Structure formats: structure tokens, C-alpha cells
Image (cartoon, grey):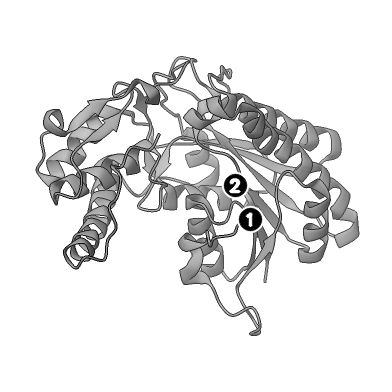
């Protein structure tokens, strides 16, 4: 049995990855931040009583801002593989919290690399590390973007991800660590946070359709993104760490669609006219925009045997169907007088 440690396990990618690894027979450990409220909703279905034996998932309090704590957890868990998915991952928010974003995303990766370098001798085995990169690192570079495309980051989040990427490359070359950078293009799912534009669209449109809210407020509708399914992308992460040698890989579908196209398709699925329910709010525009991201996944296909299984329309349908069920539940609760007044879905 292999053991894996996942930072950011409570996020979209962390939950899908935990499912995948448990299904492959791994013992999975997750790093979670202490909170006064429960934030484990995406992994509650994987939870088992920690007092029981042979529990496939165990959680540890820790944070990427705490290098000493990570060292302790790595020595205690002695993982074969570590997946660093933890981050302040909202691009627009990174303009409002640049220092926090840089600390967690950039320096957090450096702390983890140092902890792995320090812990390998103590645990007596090689630890393979996956570092989550982002297509946002390419920023203003012309598409298509591949592993050899120069980075041109356009947000504090992207700058921090570029730093984390090069930290990983440097530790691989300087100390021989088995570190892979996964440069993942946009990947979505029904588990996507509701302030991210795709989920914001599907959640709001389904609620508007049922009369639970009136408007959807968005920013730039012309930005183009290469959108895939998060469940497919965590499989690529795992494949990287099974390879004979560490390397860096772009993970993408090879197709790009605009926010407007995503909106129009989702609206058609629920029978709404976007022109009647969508408004623009300049607060959701970035100070420096990224116009066009389109990945070239040929290296991942050829060397890892990875290909996406969900196309663009299938992804939108999956998210619309899920959020339709949520909206129907909200409607029942509202009609029963059990749902408090909810603000319009207008996250960033």
C-alpha cells in the first residue's frame, strides 16, 4: 500500500484526487487549515471514524505558511507521494490579497520543498512531489501554450505560481528531488467554488430559472479559456508521479471557449436568454486581464497516456444538472419557510 499526502485536500481537486487514490488502494492523508466552522464538505463522503482501523483517509491540521509543522507531518506520515494543491487560488482575489497569495502559493511551495528535502533521509525513502502549476502563468503569452512557452504572468497569483514552478525545477536539479510541475489549464466540476466564474454561472442561472434570484453579475465575457473536467485532471497528476523520471507537463483539452460561450450554452440548457438576466459589474474585471489561454497537451498524451474524457458540452451539462438539483432543493426549503433570504450569487 502506498501512502499519499495532499495539501488542499478540501478543495475541488483535492477531493477528486483523494477519491482516485483511495480507489487505487492508497492510504491518504490530507492537510487542512484550522477553522471554527467545518470546511470538509467536499470530502465528507470519504470520511471514516479515525478511531477505526484501516481508515483510508486521515486529516492533519497544518498550513503551507508553517514549515516546521509540515516537516513534522511529513515525518509522521512518511508519504510515498505528496500532492501540493493548497493555495489561495482565486485570481481576482489575489489582487486584493497579494502578500497573502504570494506567501501561501510561492513561499508555501518553497517551504514544502525544504520539508521534503529534510524529511527524505529521516523517513528512509524517496518522496515524490507534485507541484500544482497553472495556465495563468502564461498570462499574456500568445496561444497555444506548451511546456516550452515563456511565462508572462498577469496577476499576483500567477506570479506566485511561476515562483513555485521554478523553485520546484531548482530543487529537482540541485538536490535530485523527484518533483513534477503540472501546468493545469482551467478545470471545473460541480465541486467548483461558487465564486469561480463557471460555477457562478451555472449556480445563478439555475436559481434564476426557478425564481430564487433575479440577476447574474459578471465581468469580462470575452476571455477565452481551455476548460476541462477536474476529475480527468487529477488522473494526470497521479500519472506524473508514476513516471520513471520527473518532468513538467501541460494538462489541457486543446480547445478554448469564451466565458460568453460558456454562459450561452448553460443558459440554453436551462431555457434562459442571457441578455435578460446578465449584467456587467466592473468590480469583477482584473487590473491586468488574461485574454486567451489554450493548452497543448501533446506531451502528457504521448508520455503519460493521458487524454480528457469529458468535452466542453459534457462539462457544462454536468454542472448545470448538479446545480439544477441544488436549486430545486433551495426552492423546496424556501416554500417551506426554511430558507433564509439569500443574496444574489455575485461572487468574484
The answer to whether mark 1 and mark 2 are in CB contact below 8 A is yes
Mark 1 to mark 2: distance in Å?
7 Å
Q: On screen, 180 above or below 329?
A: above
Q: Position of residue 348 (x, y in %)?
A: 40, 34
Q: Position of residue 311 (x, y in %)?
A: 30, 43
Q: Quadrant of residue 155?
A: top right
Relative placement, left or right, of 200 versus 91 is left
Q: On screen, 313 above or below 75?
A: above
- Helix, strand, or loop for circle 1? strand
Q: Position of residue 202 (x, y in %)?
A: 26, 44
Q: Which residue is the site of mark 2? A: 85
Residue 208's label in the rendered image is none
| Other-residue count near label 1 (Cα within 10 Å), few / some / many at <14 / 14–19 / ≥20 | many
Residue ID at (67%, 38%): 104
Q: On screen, 228 above or below 141?
A: below
Q: Which residue is the site of mark 1? A: 6
Amino acid at each position: 500500500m502506498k501512502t499519499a499526502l495532499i495539501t488542499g485536500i478540501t478543495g475541488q481537486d483535492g477531493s477528486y484526487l483523494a477519491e482516485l487514490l483511495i480507489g487505487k488502494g492508497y492510504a491518504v492523508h490530507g492537510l487542512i487549515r484550522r477553522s471554527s466552522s467545518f470546511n470538509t464538505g467536499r470530502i465528507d463522503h470519504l470520511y471514516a471514524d479515525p478511531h477505526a482501523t484501516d481508515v483510508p483517509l486521515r486529516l492533519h491540521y497544518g498550513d503551507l505558511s508553517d514549515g516546521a509543522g509540515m516537516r513534522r507531518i511529513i515525518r509522521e506520515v512518511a508519504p510515498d507521494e505528496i500532492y501540493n494543491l493548497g493555495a489561495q487560488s482565486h485570481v481576482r482575489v489575489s489582487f486584493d490579497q497579494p502578500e497573502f497569495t504570494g506567501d501561501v502559493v510561492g513561499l508555501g511551495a518553497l517551504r514544502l520543498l525544504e520539508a521534503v528535502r529534510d524529511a527524505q533521509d529521516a523517513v528512509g525513502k524517496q518522496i515524490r512531489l507534485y507541484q500544482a502549476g497553472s495556465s495563468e502563468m502564461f498570462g499574456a503569452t500568445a496561444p497555444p501554450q506548451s511546456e516550452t512557452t515563456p511565462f508572462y504572468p498577469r496577476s499576483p497569483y500567477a506570479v506566485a505560481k511561476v515562483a513555485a514552478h521554478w523553485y520546484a525545477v531548482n530543487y529537482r536539479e540541485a538536490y535530485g528531488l523527484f518533483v513534477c510541475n503540472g501546468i493545469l489549464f482551467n478545470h471545473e466540476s460541480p465541486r467548483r467554488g461558487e465564486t469561480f466564474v463557471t460555477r457562478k454561472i451555472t449556480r445563478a442561472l439555475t436559481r434564476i430559472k426557478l425564481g430564487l434570484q433575479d440577476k447574474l453579475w459578471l465581468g469580462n465575457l470575452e476571455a477565452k479559456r481551455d476548460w476541462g473536467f477536474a476529475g480527468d485532471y487529477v488522473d494526470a497528476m497521479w500519472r506524473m508521479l508514476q513516471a520513471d523520471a520527473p518532468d513538467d507537463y501541460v494538462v489541457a483539452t486543446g480547445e478554448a471557449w469564451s466565458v460568453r460561450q460558456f454562459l450561452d450554452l448553460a443558459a440554453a440548457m436551462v431555457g434562459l436568454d442571457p441578455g435578460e438576466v446578465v449584467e456587467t459589474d466592473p468590480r469583477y474585471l482584473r487590473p491586468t486581464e488574461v485574454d486567451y489561454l489554450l493548452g497543448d497537451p501533446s506531451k502528457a498524451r504521448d508520455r503519460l497516456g493521458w487524454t480528457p474524457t469529458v468535452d466542453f458540452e459534457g462539462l457544462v451539462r454536468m454542472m448545470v444538472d448538479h446545480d439544477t438539483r441544488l436549486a430545486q432543493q433551495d426552492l423546496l426549503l424556501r416554500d417551506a419557510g426554511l430558507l433564509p433570504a439569500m443574496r444574489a450569487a455575485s461572487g468574484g
